[in-house]
Image: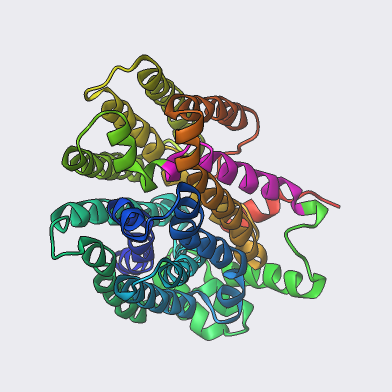
Amino acid sequence: MNKIVLWSLCAAFAGFLFGFDTVVISGAEKQLQQIWQSSDAFHGTFVIGMALWGTVAGALFGSFPTNFLGRKKSLFFIGILYVISALGSALVDDPYTFGIFRFIGGLGVGASTIAAPAYISEIAPEKDRGRLVAFYQFNIVLGMLAAYASNYLLRETGSEPWRWMIGMEALPALIYTFLVLVIPQSPRWLISQGKMEKARSILAKIDTSKDLDSKIAEIKRQADHGKSSKENIFMKKYRKPLILAFLIAFFNQFSGINALLYYAPRIFEEAGLEESASLLSSIGVGVTNIIFTFLALFLIDRLGRRTLMFIGSIGYIVSLAMVSAAFFLDWGGMSVPIFIFIFIAAHAIGQGSVIWVFISEIFPNHLRAGGQAFGSSTHWVLAAIIPSLVPVLFGSIGAGWVFACFAFMMVLQLLYVKFMMPETKGKSLEDLGLGLSERE
């Protein structure tokens, strides 16, 4: 089991870079808007939004290298994209080139949401799969905390602190790229490529209690069926997992999570905190996120994915309603940060830990990368649109109405969990793939 944990952690470190890349811009974005004198619309849609559209492209097309090169090689090239993006973004002098390098980093983020969860789910024993795939989310929030702390520590470095903030990502990106070299290839991907003996040796290390011959035969049967039938995720028989993936990704972003992570310091300043206090409060967001994600790691294979989504949905509704009320009633002080910390806790224990696990489980082996790409691209299209609109919406309708809309969407998420979402804990990927597909 130690080897599996090590391999999972190495692959999941892609999530650390995802988290770091997602929020490192929050400490630099106001500096950049002042330096380049950007309008709110240009700043939101291009300077901030280019990374997000890169993520959309990475999620849309990341299934192709994940399928054809394999999970391991894809993870390696994702590391290279992060290195290029971090160094390039830190060294440029205009918003257009900056946006291009941030777009490259976004490609890495989007592709990692396909390759890393798919890889981990395919090497993990059923009883530990939720926890091991959730390492990816744990690394995301660890990366976010590291970025918030890094931004705070580098806030007065040199004449242009933003360059140090953005460029710091190159260091963990290099470490990750070399870590990927130590992990084996996915045994399920190897079987799909006809490399049976290599797959057998890896499967033997994963779970010695299994009858390898029958396990390999079942995986091969599904892989051969996928090749011979030329199936895709949009076929009628896969309508159920497709809808489930779409809705969990849809509600993930309509909670407002990425809008908050990108603009946390700005939101705290809107609530009346000074700049240094707002940056420090952002670190509080990271600490809360990591504590409750760690709790979710402990619970996800015990209580199950659906129960955690129930808990998170209720936490979302209460906290977002309180944040909205704080802005409407001008409560001020630490009220907004406290309610946002509750919101982050709800996200960490629910959607944050469940989404990548759930999407990686509900599609058959031969369609997993494609299903992961669909769920991830839905997530990232909305993650590009919603944060890009935040500066404009805050200036037009006000923060109170924005958070009220997010609270309403979480009521709808609660209904999705209650009436549509199945429990996937403890079931093999092969059983889930068959169970959620409709018979024709």
Q: Main secondary structure of the magenta part?
A: helix
**Residue 225's image quarter?**
bottom right
Q: Is residue 335 magenta?
A: no
| Horizontal relation, residue 381 to residue 257: left or right | right
| Horizontal relation, residue 174 to residue 191: left or right | left
| Horizontal relation, residue 22 to residue 198: left or right | left
Q: Is residue 356 above or below residue 278?
A: below
Percent position of residue 399, x then y = 43, 29
Q: Is residue 239 magenta?
A: yes
How are the colours assigned in the image? rainbow
Q: Residue furthest right?
A: 440
Q: Residue furthest top?
A: 329
317 or 184: nearer the viewer = 317
Residue drawn at point x = 50 percent, y = 32 percent: 396
**Residue 164's image quarter?**
bottom left
Residue drawn at point x = 70 percent, y = 70 percent: 221
Q: Is residue 440 above or below residue 334?
A: below
Magenta extent: 238-259
